[in-house]
Image: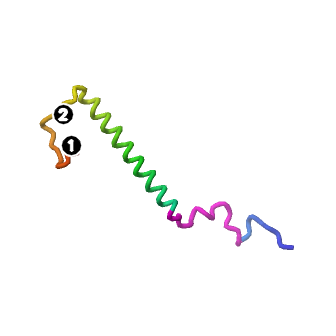
Amino acid sequence: MQENRVDSPNDAGPHLHAHTAPTTQQMRTVGQRRRDAEEKLEHHLREARHKDHPHGDESADEPRQDDGERSI
C-alpha cells in the first residue's frame, strides 16, 4: 500500500494554487473590485475638495480640463 506523505516530491502542498494562472472569472472580479475602489476613492476626493470650499465656489485661478474637472 502506498503512503500519502506530506514531504513527498509529488505533493505540491498548500501552495499549489498560489502559482496557477487566475481564471477569467477571477480576473473579471479583480477588475470590477478595482473599478469600484477607484470610483469610491474619486468620490472621497470630491467630498474632500468640497469641504475645502464650503460655499460651493471654486477658485477661479485653478486651471480646468476640458471636461470641467480640475487638473492636478
Where's residue 35, x and y in %? Answer: 40, 51
Tell me the magenta residue range: 9-24
**Numbered disc 1: secondary structure:** loop
Q: Is residue 34 magenta?
A: no
Q: Residue at x 31, y 34 (%)?
A: 48
Would residue 43 appear left or right of 64 to someone viewing this image?
A: right
Residue situated in front as seen by the camera: 2 or 36 = 36
**Numbered disc 2: secondary structure:** loop
Q: Which residue ends up furthest to the left in the rendered image?
A: 61
Amino acid marked by disc 2:
Glu
Q: Is residue 13 magenta?
A: yes
Give the image's coloring scheme.
rainbow
**Which quadrant would residue 49 be assigned to in this image?**
top left
Amino acid marked by disc 1:
Arg
Quadrant that contains the N terminus: bottom right
Residue 16 lies, with reference to residue 47, above or below; the image says below
Q: Residues within 10 Å of mark 1 (few under 14, many from 20)?
A: few
Residue 44 lies, with reference to residue 31, above or below; the image says above
Sequence-earlier tag: 2 or 1: 2
Q: Which residue ends up furthest to the right in the rendered image?
A: 1
Q: Residue at x 15, y 43 (%)?
A: 63
Which numbered tag is attached to residue 58? Answer: 2
Q: Residues within 10 Å of mark 2 (few under 14, many from 20)?
A: few
Residue 71 lies, with reference to residue 16, above or below; the image says above
What residue is shown with label 1? Answer: 70
Would residue 50 appear left or right of 4 to someone viewing this image?
A: left
Where's residue 60, x and y in %? Answer: 13, 35
Which numbered tag is attached to residue 52? Answer: none
Q: Do the residues under discs 2 and 1 have CB atoms within 8 angstroms?
A: yes
Where's residue 45, x and y in %? Answer: 32, 39
